[in-house]
Each structure stands twice: as structure tokens, then as C-alpha cells.
Image (cartoon, rainbow, N blue to C red):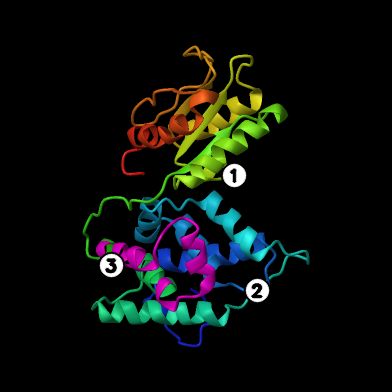
């Protein structure tokens, strides 16, 4: 943690891993060509650096690629030349000071990533609150989990709404995918735009087409993250077992048959399939 931009002079309290978080935050700000290091960049540094904070955030479903996408969507990509040294924003400085305060309140002699996460959450900037809300997370619950991690208490992964990715990628399937997405939203299952953010991938296959190369690529990306893949077989489609790459998911997900005449009931059954495929996600 650099003393420059840190008026509190608390550099010696930070562990090596906590200092690396500030370096990672600087790199993330540079990645977006932003002009200062904010709490959102500190959060990205915590996600990517490992340690207690990364474990807490991973248990809440926060992964680095999706988190970067959310920061980009909220704050944009800069267009200027890549900057050198960047200052901390006022909010980031307060978060660092609050991390020290959290450590002292707990009777600890050092500031590690768990304390940094507490500081970022205690600062309460909208950038981080909104980012976590996009994951269906409550700041108070994440803080409780960070305290538990610092105390060595294991908590079950945070229960949250499932994030689903629809893989189809044929222009003529757009209407069907849109209907599925709308219905999933109605029953509280959010559809995300990137495989890197999803809890379950839905591979939509109709009776007159085979999986496309794009679908195979997306399923392979899901397999790398051990994300379950649920084949959604439309109007009598049959999917041989070798048509899609296998995943390392906890258990194989049964295919779901979707017919136009029973569309609403069939899409509603996805909730049960998702819970089966990814326990703890509802």
C-alpha cells in the first residue's frame, strides 16, 4: 500500500497481500483508463488478489471477469493515454482508513484483505453498493461474511437468485430466447450476458438444428468454471449425449423439454432444474 495518496501513514500495518491489492487496483484503473483509483477498483483488486476477501466474494458469486464488466458498464472505458501514477479517490482513501479502524476494533495488529473488504463496504460508496446489488447481494450480509472469515468461521455460500446464460446464437432463435428470458425474469431468475457470470448455462436446441460452434464454445467456457449445462430441448428436439462438451459440474443436469403449447409451465420448471444442478442457488 503506497504511502503516496494515503494521508494516514498506516503503510506498515498492511500485510504484503493487502499491499498487492492496491497494486492490483491501480492496474484495474489503468485497464479502464480511469483517472483515479476508486472503491470499485479496490473491490476488483480484492477479487483478483486471493486471500480471505476473495474467498468471501467468491462464495457470494463475484468473479473477476463479470465484476470487470459491471465496472465498465457503470463507469465506462476511458479514451485518454494510459496514465502512470494515479491518486486514490476520496472514497478510496476513506475505505483504507476504515480498514485500519476495523482492524483495530477487532484487536488485530495488521490489516489484511478481509479488513480491506470491511473498509470498502463500510465506506458505502454507491459504486460498490450498486455493483454488489447487481449480483443480488446485500452489503450487510457480505460484511457479516467478512467478519466471519476473519474469525475463522465457515459460512455456507450466500443464497441468491440464479444467474442464467442462454446459449442459442442463431438469428431465427432470437424471438424464442427473448420469450424464455422474459419468463425467467418474471419468476425471479436473472439472465446475464456473459458466460463468465452465470451459475447455470441453458443450451437451447430445437428439432431442426444441431448445436452451433458458438454454443460449443460457450459450453466449453462453462465447463472451465464447472458451471452446469442444462439442455433445453424445444418442441421434441433430441440431443445425443456427445453433442455438447461434458462439464465438471457437481452433478449432471437433466435436459428440460420445452413445448410451445405448455411454454409457461415448462419454463417455470427451470427453477427446479436449476436447484438440482446447482445446490444453494434458487
Measured from the top left, where is residue 255 in percent x and y?
Answer: 43, 22
* Quarter residue 212 falls in: top right
Q: Pointer 2: what residue?
A: 85
Q: Nearer the viewer, mark 3 or mark 1?
A: 1
Please name the residue that numbered disc 1 is placed on.
193
Whether 142 is among the magenta residues is yes
Residue 45 shows up from this direction: no
Q: Are marks 2 and 3 in contact (CB under 8 Å)?
A: no
- The first of marks 3 and 1 along the sequence is 3
274 left or right of 149?
right
Q: Residue at x 52, y 24 (%)?
A: 261
CB atoms at circles 1 and 2 under 8 Å apart?
no
Give the residue number, with chain letter if any, for mark 3. Answer: 147
Residue 169 placement (x, y as % from top left): 66, 30
Instruction: Give the structural element (helix, strand or loop) at label 3.
Output: helix
Q: Which mark is residue 244?
A: none
Marks 1/2: CA distance? Answer: 33 Å
Q: Tag 2: Cα neighbours inside 10 Å, few (<14), some, or many (≥20)? A: few
What residue is shown at x 40% (from left), y 32% (from top)? 269
What is the quadrant of the C terminus in the image? top left
Can I make out residue 237 in this image? Answer: yes
Residue at figure coordinates x 46%, y 14% from the top left: 241
Identify the magenta region. 121-148
What residue is drawn where x is 41% and y is 71%? 121
Q: Earlier in the sequence, mark 1 or mark 2?
A: 2
Compared across the picture, whether 43 is left or right of 113 comes to: right
The foreground one among 24 and 155 is: 155
Residue 162: give x, y in percent of width and height. 42, 45
Magenta part mainly helix, strand or loop? helix
Mark 2 vs 3, N-terminal side:
2
Amino acid at each position: 500500500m503506497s504511502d503516496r495518496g494515503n494521508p494516514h501513514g498506516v503503510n506498515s500495518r498492511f500485510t504484503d497481500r493487502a499491499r498487492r491489492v492496491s497494486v492490483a487496483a491501480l492496474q484495474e484503473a489503468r485497464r479502464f483508463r480511469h483517472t483515479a483509483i476508486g472503491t470499485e477498483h479496490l473491490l476488483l483488486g480484492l477479487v483478483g488478489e486471493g486471500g480471505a476477501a476473495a474467498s468471501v466474494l467468491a462464495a457470494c458469486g463475484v468473479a473477476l471477469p463479470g465484476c470487470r464488466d459491471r465496472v465498465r458498464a457503470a463507469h465506462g472505458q476511458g479514451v485518454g493515454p494510459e496514465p502512470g501514477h494515479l491518486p486514490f479517490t476520496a472514497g478510496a482513501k476513506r475505505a483504507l482508513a476504515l480498514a485500519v479502524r476495523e482492524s483495530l476494533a477487532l484487536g488485530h495488529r495488521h490489516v489484511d484483505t478481509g479488513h480491506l473488504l470491511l473498509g470498502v463496504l463500510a465506506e458505502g460508496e454507491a459504486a460498490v453498493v450498486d455493483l454488489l446489488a447487481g449480483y443480488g447481494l446485500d452489503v450487510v450480509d457480505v460484511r457479516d461474511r467478512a467478519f466471519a472469515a476473519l474469525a475463522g468461521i465457515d459460512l455456507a455460500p450466500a443464497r441468491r437468485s440464479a444467474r442464467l446464460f442462454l446459449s442459442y446464437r442463431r438469428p431465427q432463435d432470437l424471438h424464442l430466447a427473448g420469450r424464455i428470458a422474459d419468463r425467467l425474469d418474471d419468476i425471479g431468475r436473472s439472465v446475464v450476458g456473459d458466460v463468465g457470470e452465470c451459475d447455470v448455462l441453458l443450451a437451447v436446441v430445437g428439432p431442426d438444428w444441431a448445436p452451433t460452434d458458438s454454443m460449443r464454445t460457450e459450453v466449453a467456457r462453462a465447463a472451465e468454471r464447472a458451471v452446469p449445462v442444462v439442455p433445453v430441448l424445444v418442441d421434441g428436439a433430441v440431443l445425443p449425449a456427445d453433442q455438447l462438451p461434458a462439464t465438471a459440474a457437481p452433478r449432471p443436469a437433466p435436459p428440460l423439454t420445452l413445448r410451445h403449447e405448455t411454454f409457461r409451465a415448462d419454463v417455470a420448471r427451470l427453477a427446479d432444474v436449476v436447484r438440482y444442478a446447482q445446490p444453494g442457488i434458487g
